[in-house]
């Protein structure tokens, strides 16, 4: 049976990757490209998807790595 920390790590990794993917897809849309051209940055929602997805995925990787170090 898997430990709760391992399950949480996997869920964070998958959820973070999904958020990052949706943020990336949003950043490639026509409206986002036009906004970036004039404002020089992505919209706030797209930025939060990218940051949140990367942070969640990183936390998931760290949790999974910590579980591997404990077993070794």
Image (cartoon, helix red, strand yellow):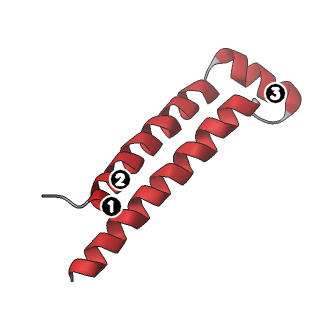
Give 10 or 25, whichever is nearer the viewer: 10
Q: Are marks 2 and 3 in contact (CB under 8 Å)?
A: no
Which residue is at the far left? 1
Alpha carbon of mark 2 to alpha carbon of mark 3: how far?
39 Å
Residue at the (41%, 56%) spot, across then down: 60
Give the SS element for disc 3. Answer: helix
At 48% from the left and 58% from the top, the residue drawn is: 58
Residue nearer the viewer, 26 or 68:
68
Q: Disc 1, disc 3: CB below 8 Å?
A: no
- The one nearer the camera, 26 or 33, is 26
Q: To which residue does mark 2 refer? A: 8
Q: Quadrant of the N terminus?
A: bottom left
64 to the left or right of 39: left
The answer to whether mark 2 and mark 1 are in CB contact below 8 A is: yes
Q: Which mark is residue 5?
A: 1
Residue 68, horizontal then vertical, whole percent: 26, 73
How crowded pointer 1 is (Cα within 10 Å; few <14, some 14-19, many 20+) is rated as some
For label 3, the residue is 37
Where is residue 3 drawn, in percent x and y? 23, 61
Ranked by sequence position, the earlier of labels 1 and 3 is: 1
Question: Residue 5 location in percent, x, y?
Answer: 33, 61
Q: Earlier in the sequence, mark 2 or mark 3?
A: 2
């Amino acid at each position: 049976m898997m430990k709760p920390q391992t399950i949480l790590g996997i869920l964070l990794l998958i959820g973070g990757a999904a958020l990052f993917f949706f943020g990336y897809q949003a950043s490639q849309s026509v409206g986002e490209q036009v906004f970036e051209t004039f404002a020089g940055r992505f919209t706030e929602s797209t930025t939060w998807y990218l940051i949140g997805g990367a942070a969640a995925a990183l936390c998931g990787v760290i949790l999974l790595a910590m579980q591997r170090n404990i077993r070794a």
